[in-house]
Image (cartoon, helix red, strand yellow):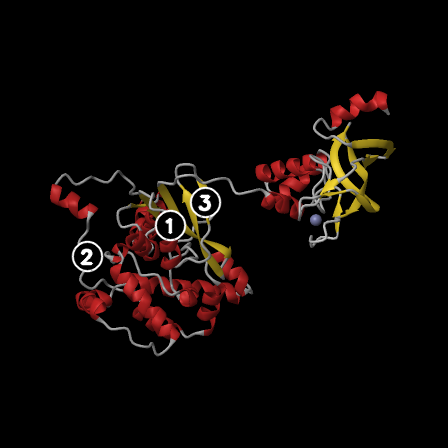
Amino acid sequence: MGDEQWFWDLVWPDVDGVVVDGVEVVEDTVRIDVHAGQRAVMCPACGTAASRVHSTYTRRLADRPIGGRRVVLRLTVRRFFCDNAVCKRRTVAEQVEHLTTPYGRRTQAVARMVQAIGLAVGGRAGARLAGYLPVRVSRDVIVREVRRLPDPPSGQVTVLGNDEFAFRKGATYGTVLIDVETRRPIDLPPDRTADAVAAWLADHPEIKVICRDRCSTFSQAAARAAPDAIQVADRWHLLHSLARAVERTAHQHRACLRKDAETGDLDEPTEPSDPAALAALIEPPEPADPPDGQLLARVRQWHTDIHELRERGWTISAIARRLGRDRKTVRHYLTTDLDQILASARERRPNGHINRFKPYLQQRFPAARPTPPPSSARSANAATAAAALSSPSTSRPSAPAPPPPNHRSRSPAPAGSPPGSCGTRRA
Ligand SMILES: [Zn+2]
């Protein structure tokens, strides 16, 4: 083997102490028999040298391919006794530096390769790519290898982005914190409460700017734990809110749009030159008690659409997908009388009723002493109402307060509204 040693030095340039006993090629696999020839190993528990042999066994390890063929190492290693009387460990398995890891089924070089594949393309695509290299790994193995990597150091974060994200969509939500300058996630608090975010902020006084959505949770956390930091609305949520506002406006004026389209009257609109008219366009006055015709017309339209599709034999899931509604909402529209749906829509009409009582409620909320809530649902509603009143995002009638999570599916929100109460970002 001495003449061939230069070849094995090329294959494993940083590995010492293994001797090649034989090579066998079977179809697309190269099997290499090697043994480790160390006289003693260091006990990882007590640090003493162990040299008395307990037993010998063979490990199978995947190694980097040679000549387009998969490589399997059949590595013979020994197990030594730890003779330190006070050590808790009885035996120590032999490891080869730069080649093996305890219990590992692939060499360190292959593990690094799998990690690089996982980081570049992810698990499922990585498993397909690895087959061509050829390295045999499943997507679960790729994800596991990537998870073994240590977290990169986050360093000093001065501009922090935060948003909620789903551990399990619709069920469990947490918070993702991002270093906006490097665009890297830096931490994942386990829930989306103001307390969790405030605790994290309290440990990081270096934060200067907080980039967030318009949800009151994060603004409360920032006001409490980082009062000097500048709070800014992030671009995604601004565009998301703008898109919803445009959609609502277009829906409100759909009769005029349809009429214009039918008559071909699509000339350039004349822009008002009067400053007062311009200001009114930008900042239209809030109606004292907005008419509810548009909302109810929308509810009636949904009711008609859902029943029409049902009569044509569509399933509830198919209708929900087609109309972009929740399945529970579709079922509710199918099983409930239209008058009843309209009555509950009138009750929940955003801000319509509450506007008149807002000054009184704003005056009462800070002074109110907390009393035991009669039920969890009422407490959730009260919290939502309090958040709606304290949040600047609800100062205009066009921004309805988010419903509590348990009642989200019953809310007649416009199609395409986000699943989370604060507009969950979708990847
Ligand atoms: Zn020991």
Residue lying furthest bottom in this view?
A: 374
Q: Earlier in the sequence, mark 2 or mark 1?
A: 1
The residue pinned by badge 3 equals 186
The residue pinned by badge 1 equals 203
- Give 417 or 190, whichever is nearer the viewer: 190
Q: Is residue 13 left or right of residue 319?
A: right
- Give 153 or 332, whichever is nearer the viewer: 153
Q: State the quadrant of the N terminus.
A: top right
Q: Residues within 10 Å of mark 2 (few under 14, many from 20)?
A: few
Q: Residues within 10 Å of mark 3 (few under 14, many from 20)?
A: some
Q: Is residue 317 left or right of residue 180?
A: right
User: Given the image, on which type of amino acid does mark 2 rest?
Assistant: Glu
The residue pinned by badge 2 equals 286
- Distance Cα–Cα, label 3 vs label 2: 42 Å
Residue 236 in sight here: no
Q: Position of residue 367 (x, y in %)?
A: 20, 69
- Distance Cα–Cα, label 1 vs label 3: 14 Å
Q: Ligand 1 near label 1 (Cβ, under 8 Å)?
A: no
Q: Earlier in the sequence, mark 1 or mark 3?
A: 3
Is 289 drawn above or below residue 48 in the view shown? Answer: below
User: Given the image, on which type of amino acid does mark 3 rest?
Assistant: Ile
Residue at the spot x=17%, y=68% of the render?
360
Identify the element where label 1 is drawn: loop
Where residue 39 sits, quadrant-wise, is: top right
Identify the element where label 2 is drawn: loop
Q: Position of residue 231 (x, y in %)?
A: 29, 46
Q: Residues within 10 Å of mark 1 (few under 14, many from 20)?
A: few
Is 330 drawn above or below residue 10 in the view shown? Answer: below
Q: Answer whether labels 3 and 2 touch (C-beta < 8 Å).
A: no
